[in-house]
Image (cartoon, helix red, strand yellow):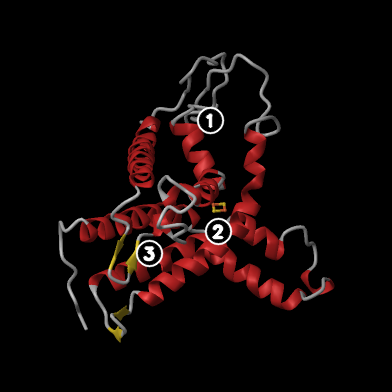
Amino acid sequence: MPAGSTRGGQRHLGGTMRQDAWWLELLPVIFLLGAFGIYATLRAFEGTYYEWGPYLSPFYSPLIDRHHRWWPLSPALLILVWPLGFRVTCYYYRKAYYRAFFLDPPACGVSEHRKHRYRGETAFPFVLQNLHRYFLYVGFLFLIFLWRDAFRAFFFDGRIGVGVGTLVLLFNVILLTTYALSCHSLRHLAGGKLDCFSCAAFGGPRHKTWQWLSVLNERHMLYAWISLITVGLTDLYVRLLASGAITDLRLL
Ligand code: FES
């Protein structure tokens, strides 16, 4: 019997014949996703310290109704649902948090605790995970704003310059773009549902695009984590500047 098998009647939560410490891989997910979730929630509700000089926090971009003419709460709350929805419905993150937070299942070859009939993602609320491709489309719109922010970060009072924050914003948007380009839905959009590229309209360009996206897609998990950490750190950097806790180092 394979090491990962749950046969033999071991259907209680955590039942497995695996000999390795399978639960170890859950810990970084719990820690990182948990820490990011708490930090992002606090920052989204804070509503201040999101801008310094030419730098704008990615949590607040695009900045809507900054003077609270019609929206009394934090501007971040107006846009949060889109990047959050994109991450929450991401195929990789789904696997990660289903395992780490719902223990459903806790790991490969480890039993979950199930009282009810398994319906996967075919019933509410998990059927909403199928909205991922639409969050992707809106995500690209957000990337346009973030690239604009990175571009603006090169201008200090009308003069071209480079600060540490410029590089931080630039690095952040490059990683977020890489994460979005490595998306499974995007890869499917380019080359999914096709048995024959040469028989399809625009088959050649689609095949090339699909090949490039596949290269990125192989490391989707890596980009998911790195971009999550860097977007949080980018916001933190802008917050520390805006609150006066640190000063920005001008490089040029
Ligand atoms: Fe992860 Fe689309 S599958 S972003």
The first of marks 2 and 3 along the sequence is 2
Q: Position of residue 108 (x, y in %)?
A: 51, 33
- Residue situated in front as seen by the camera: 20 or 181: 181
Q: Give the position of the C terminus as an image quadrant.
A: bottom left
Relative to 77, is 251 above or below? below
Asked if residue 20 shows in the view, the reply is no
Percent x, y of residue 69: 46, 54
Name the residue rendered at 58%, 66% in the picture: 213
Residue where numbered disc 3 is placed: 172
**Residue type, numbered disc 1:** Pro
Residue at image location 37% in from the left, 43% down from the top: 45
The answer to which quarter of the image holds residue 161 is bottom left
Mark 2 is surrounded, within 10 Å at the Cα level, by few (under 14), some (14 to 19) or many (20 or more) other residues, namely: many
Q: Residue at label 2?
A: 139
Could you give the CA–CA distance between mark 2 and mark 3, rounded to whole angstroms?
14 Å
Residue indicated by mark 1: 2
Looking at the picture, how far across and down is residue 134, in whole percent?
A: 65, 53
Label 1 neighbour load within 10 Å: few <14, some 14-19, many 20+: few
Camera-near label (2 vs 1) is 2
Classed neighbour count for the residue bearing mark 3: other residues with Cα under 10 Å, few (<14), some (14–19), many (≥20): many
Q: Is residue 10 left or right of residue 51?
A: right
48 or 18: which is nearer to us? 48
Determine the residue located farthest toward the right in the rendered image.
Answer: 199
Relative depth, front residue between 117 and 140:
140
- Assign the N terminus to one quadrant of the image: top right
